[in-house]
Image (tube, rainbow, N blue to C red):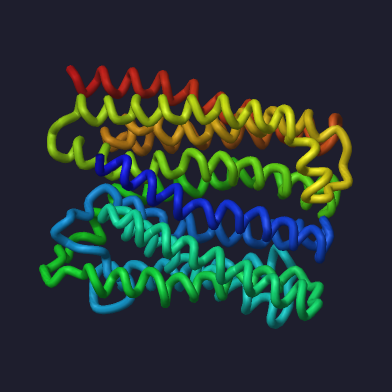
């Protein structure tokens, strides 16, 4: 019953972000055009890559080891969590600053905005994981919704009402969204549920040992899902990046909206069963979650097959033709990717993080190699096929690795 309740809250909380992503995409393409929207997407994707690398180990450590007795992690002051989060956020700031100058050739205020967004987005991401680790699904949903509302309101004001036309206006929207969520969502939740107990001083070391391989995995998995955009920019132009990103992001947002609440609700329950010694119950929960996602996959595939091309031309106003050839493989790969987060769960529970890391690294290299070879020949839409191929590669690898690792532990 607790899982069903959490799924309800996560779905409710994901509804506003899902709708917000659609509105933000529509505003970006309509008022900035595909090229400037593509520039924004590449910069924001870089921010998510940076924060995945700097903060992923804290997030995974919270979800794996944070007990109910510790309360919601205080990421703002006077705790091991606050020190870890500040270091990660500061590292995010400087890494994004370097990327802004060296790779994107940004100047002045654009460099500062992108770096500050990286700093705040790190706090926002870790804060959400802290709420999730304590089964605070309603507070998680409220905090994520506040982020979306703050972002959309800011972008709407600056782009639609005041008429600004620079891509970095959308980054300002992300910045305001982070602040709104942190001040009005995450911080109050921490204050109401904070623990008075002592936190083990070795917590950071424990998190780092467990979480760093997964952090690298998260970084590479994000790169796996984003590298095609940078390669498309290399072989073509930013306008093509904007078109491809709009289709890709909307499809993955829909699959995330449908499947992420399942993962968010089941993940703490699975790890709790495993930590309490009920391994068979943990595996049963994984199978139950996968069953939910299979049903959702069928529904999503049917919708996009019949209405996807009409939607992107009529609602989003994309100019590209023959989108169905890109929509179908992206829909399949997006749903398979959501399932992969559950399929590799046995490896995560057995702490076989290096095995997971090898799998995602091989999948990423396979995907990049296909893109480098095929993009100049078949055009940017072939990236949808290579994404599907890379996702299938990772799932096949994981299924074999699950069997090997599970048999090893049984012996």
Q: With respect to residue 193, does 216 lie above or below? A: above
Q: Nearer the viewer, residue 13 or 129?
A: 13
- Could you tell me residue 329's position as x and y percent? 68, 28
Residue visible at 88% across and 37% down in the picture? 321
* Side (left or right) of 33 relative to 339: right
The x, y position of residue 60, in whole percent, is 34, 51
Location of residue 302 with respect to 348 vertically, above or below: above
Q: Residue at x 79, y 36 (%)?
A: 309
Residue drawn at x 79%, y 58% as measured from the top left? 29
409 vs 350: above or below: above
Q: Quadrant of residue 279?
A: top left
Judge whether 349 appears above or below 204 on screen. Answer: above
Say if residue 49 shows up in the picture. Answer: no
Residue 361, horizontal then vertical, whole percent = 52, 37
Quadrant position of the C terminus in the picture: top left
The residue shown at (72%, 43%) is 247
Quarter in which the N terminus is drawn: top left
- 408 left or right of 307? left
| Left or right for 411, reference 257 | left
Q: Nearer the viewer, residue 378 or 34?
A: 34
Which residue is nearer to you in this view: 407 or 3? Answer: 3
Which residue, as the protein is rendered here, is positioned at the far left?
A: 197
Residue 32 position by quadrant: bottom right
Residue 294 shows in this picture? yes
Task: Provide residue 9's location: percent of width, then percent of height.
Answer: 38, 51
């Amino acid at each position: 019953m607790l899982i069903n309740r959490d799924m309800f809250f996560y779905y409710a909380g994901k509804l506003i972000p899902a709708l917000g992503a659609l509105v933000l995409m529509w505003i970006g393409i309509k008022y900035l055009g595909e090229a400037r929207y593509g520039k924004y997407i590449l910069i924001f994707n870089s921010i998510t890559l940076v924060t995945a690398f700097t903060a992923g180990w804290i997030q995974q450590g919270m979800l794996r080891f944070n007990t109910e007795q510790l309360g919601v992690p205080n990421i703002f002051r006077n705790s091991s969590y606050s020190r870890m989060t500040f270091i990660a956020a500061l590292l995010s700031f400087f890494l994004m600053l370097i990327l802004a100058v060296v790779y994107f050739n940004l100047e002045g205020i654009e460099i500062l905005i992108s770096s500050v967004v990286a700093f705040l987005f790190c706090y926002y991401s870790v804060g959400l994981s802290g709420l999730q680790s304590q089964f605070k699904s309603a507070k998680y949903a409220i905090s994520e919704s506040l982020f979306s509302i703050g972002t959309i309101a800011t972008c709407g004001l600056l782009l639609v009402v005041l008429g600004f036309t620079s891509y970095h206006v959308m980054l300002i929207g992300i910045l305001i969204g982070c602040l709104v969520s942190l001040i009005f969502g995450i911080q109050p939740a921490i204050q109401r549920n904070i623990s008075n107990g002592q936190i083990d001083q070795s917590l950071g070391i424990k998190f780092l040992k467990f979480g760093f391989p997964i952090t690298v995995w998260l970084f590479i998995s994000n790169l796996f899902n984003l590298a095609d955009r940078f390669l498309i920019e290399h072989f073509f132009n930013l306008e093509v990046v904007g078109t491809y990103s709009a289709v890709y992001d909307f499809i993955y947002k829909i699959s995330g909206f449908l499947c992420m609440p399942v993962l968010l609700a089941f993940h703490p329950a699975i790890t709790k069963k495993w930590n309490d010694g009920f391994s068979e119950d943990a595996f049963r929960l994984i199978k139950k979650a996968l069953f939910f996602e299979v049903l959702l996959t069928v529904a999503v595939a049917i919708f996009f097959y019949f209405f996807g091309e009409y939607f992107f031309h009529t609602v989003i106003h994309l100019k590209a033709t023959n989108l169905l050839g890109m929509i179908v493989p992206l829909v399949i790969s997006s749903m398979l990717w959501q399932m992969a987060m559950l399929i590799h769960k046995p490896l995560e529970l057995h702490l076989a993080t290096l095995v997971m890391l090898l799998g995602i690294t091989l999948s990423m290299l396979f995907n990049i190699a296909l893109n480098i070879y095929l993009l100049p020949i078949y055009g940017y839409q072939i990236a949808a096929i290579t994404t599907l191929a890379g996702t299938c590669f990772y799932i096949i690898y994981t299924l074999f690795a699950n069997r090997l690792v599970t048999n090893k532990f049984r012996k």
